[in-house]
Image (cartoon, rainbow, N blue to C red):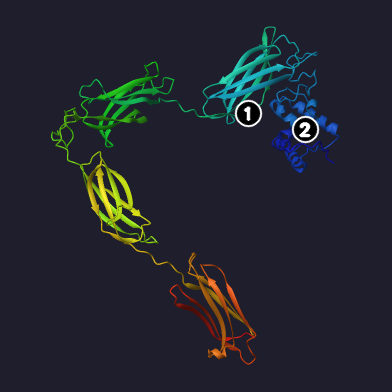
Amino acid sequence: MPTEVDDIDIEDVEDALLRAEELAVITGRKKTDIVADLLDDGKLNLSAGSDAEVKKDILDIAQEKAEKFKTLITTLIPVLALLLGIGAEGLGVLDVTGWGSDSMWEDDDPNNPNNYWHDDECYPAWGYDEYGYVEENNLEVRYAFQDYNTCGIEHFGGHFIITLFESGNQADQEFIRNIDFVDYINIEYTFSDLEAGTYSYRVEFHVVECEDGSCEHGDEYYMPANNQFIIEDIEPVGCDAYLINAQSYILEADAENDAVRISADVDVTDEEDNCDSEQFQLTWRLYQDNQIKYEHLTYEDGAVTDPDGADYTFHTWDNVDVGTYDSKVLLMLNGELLDEQWIGNSLTVESPQILGCTDSEATNYNADATDDDGSCEYPPTEPCDVEIHNHYRGHVAEDDEQDAILVAFKVVPENCEDKNIFVEIDLFQNGYAANYTWETMVSGNNEVDISHIFDGIAVGNSWIPMITASHEGNQLEQVNFWGIDIVAQEPETCEINLFDISLQTNSTHAIVAYDLDCGTETNDLDGYNVSVQFLIYPVNDTSQENIVVYDTLLHYIQGYVDDTHTITLTNFSDNNTTHYDIYWYAIWTDADGTQQFIEQKWLNREMEV
C-alpha cells in the first residue's frame, strides 16, 4: 500500500502540480505518478518503505542533486517539506525564503552550500530583507544581507548581481563587485529611464574566497525574482502658456480719444524652461456687431523675462472709427490655440464733441451738436388743457339688485407736462347736490382710461354723472352725462319644485315618497303651504264618488332642503281587482295669489301578488 503523508492546502497542491517534473526528479518517481497522487487526494503517496525510510531516501536524493537544483531547492523545499510532513525546522536552507537558518546539510559536509568557510565551530546563515519601488520611469532596488549567526568572521567577500527582467525576459544586469563586509551589508541600485512595461528583478550573491594572495570563485546564491513593477508611459512635458490680466481701454493721452489698446500677460505654466526656444503668436481683435472690425498679429518670445513669471504685451490701434467694440485676444503656439479671452468691458469710440442745443423741440436746435450746452430756447408755454372723451354710463348687468351705475371715460391732457390733474366724478339728480362722489389723479400728458362703479344707488330717476378735471384749483374741463334711472326690483319669490318622487306597491299597500323644494338651489326665500294628496281610482274611472282610497298631508315648503316625505295607503285592494289608476298632487297658492299644482300619475298599475 502507498504511504500517505499529511494533508496540504489546495494552493500547495496547485504549486506542487506545477512542479511535478521537479518532484519526480527529486523523489525518483515518474511525473505521471506524482500528478496522479496529487489529483487523487491532494497527498503525495510514497511508494515503498516506512515513512521515515521514504523521507530519508528523498532527502538523500535531494542532497545528491543539490548542485544541479540550487535555485530550485529554495522554492521547492517548503512545498516538499509540507508534502513529507517534515516542516521547515527539519530542513534548513539558505534563508532566502523565510524558512529559518537550520540546514538540511550536515555541518561538516564539504558540499554544504551554506558554508563559505567550513568552520567546525560556526557557519553563516544568511537572510535578506529587500524593498523595491517605482518612481516615474525608475526602479530602485534596496537589499539588506545579514548573517544571523553572527559568527564574527573577520571579513566576507564577493559580488552581487542584480538582474532586471521585463515580461520575463532579461532586460538589464548590474554587477556590484569586490564587496567586503562583516555580518551585514546594504546594497542599493536604481535602473533608470526604463521604458513602459512590467518588470521584476533577481539578486544573486557570488562568494569570492581569497587566501595567500589568490582568489577563487565560491558558492553562488540566487534570491527569487521579486514581484512585478509597472512602468507607465510618461508624456513629455511641452511648452504651455495662458493669458492673464487681459484689458482693453481707450488711451487717455490720445487727444482725439480714438486710440484703443488691448494688453495681456503671457504666463508660462511650465517651470522647466520648455518654452525658451518657442515663439508665441498673439492675435488682437476688435469686434463690432459680432464681426471682426480690426485684427493684428504680434509675436512674443517663449523665454520669460519678467520676474513675476509673466511677460506683458499689447497692441494699440489709432484712429478707430466711431462705434462700440468688444475685445478679444488669442494665444497661439505653432498653429495650436493655447488660450483665448473675451475682455468683459465694451469700448465706445465717440464722435468729436460739438457743443450746442440738442433738444429738437427747441427753436435753436442744432442737429450737429453732440453735447448740450444749455443754450436751448423754446416758444412761449401753452396752458395745460384737458378733454374728456369716450364717456359712458350704464347699469351693471351682473348686479343682482340693479342699483349699480358704471361711469367710464378717457382723460386726454395737453401741455400738462409735470402737472398733476385732479379728476372728480359726481352722481346727482336735477335740483339736488351730489349724493355720490369719487376722485382720482392723473399726471402729465398721458392719456388715461378711467372707470368707476357706484353701487347701492337709491331708487330714483335720472341720476346724472358729472366729470370735472382741474389743476391747482383751476377747472380745466367739466362734462355731464345723460341721466340713468334706478328702478325698484320686484322681490324674488320661489316656485315649488318637485325634486324627486317614487312609488312602490304590493298586493295591499301603495307608498309614495317625494321631495318638494322652494326653488332649485339653496336660498332664503319665503315658502308656501302645500297640500299633498295621494289617491287610488279604479282603472279609467276618476269620479269623485268612486275613489278607492286617498290621503292628504299639508307641508310648509321653504328653501332647498333634502326632506323626503311619504304617504302610505293600505288594505284597499280586493281579490277581483289587480289594476288601479294612482294619482299624486301638490297644490299651493303662489305669491301672486294664483293656485298652482303639480300632478304625477301611474295608470293601470298592477298590484304585486
Question: How dense is the environment of label 2, judged by Cα within 10 Å: few (below 14), some, or many (20 and up)?
Answer: some
- In the picture, the quarter occupied by the N terminus is top right
Q: Nearer the viewer, mark 1 or mark 2?
A: 1
Residue 42 in percent (x, y) is at: 76, 40
Query: Mark 1 highlights which residue?
Result: 227
**Residue for point 63% across, 18% down:** 160
Looking at the image, residue 150 lies above or below residue 538:
above
Q: Are marks 1 and 2 in contact (CB under 8 Å)?
A: no
Q: Quadrant of residue 8?
A: top right
Describe the element under mark 2 as helix, strand or loop.
helix
Q: CA distance from mark 1 to mark 2?
A: 24 Å
Q: Tell me which label, 1 or 2, sits earlier in the chain.
A: 2
Camera-side residue: 385 or 575?
385
User: Residue 532, percent across and down?
Assistant: 54, 78
**In the rendered image, is residue 295 in sight?**
yes
Residue drawn at 18 percent across, 33 percent down: 358
Q: Is residue 199 above or below residue 471?
A: above
Q: Position of residue 544 (x, y in %)?
A: 54, 89
Q: Quadrant of residue 225?
A: top right
Is residue 311 positioned above or below 369 on the image?
Answer: above
Q: Report if residue 68 is visible in the image.
A: no
- Residue flagged by tag 2: what amino acid is it? Leu
Q: Which residue is mark 2?
A: 82
Extreme residue in the bottom direction: 576
User: Which quadrant of the figure contains the C terminus?
Assistant: bottom right
**Residue 344: quadrant of the picture:** top left
Residue at x 53%, y 77% (from the top left corner):
531
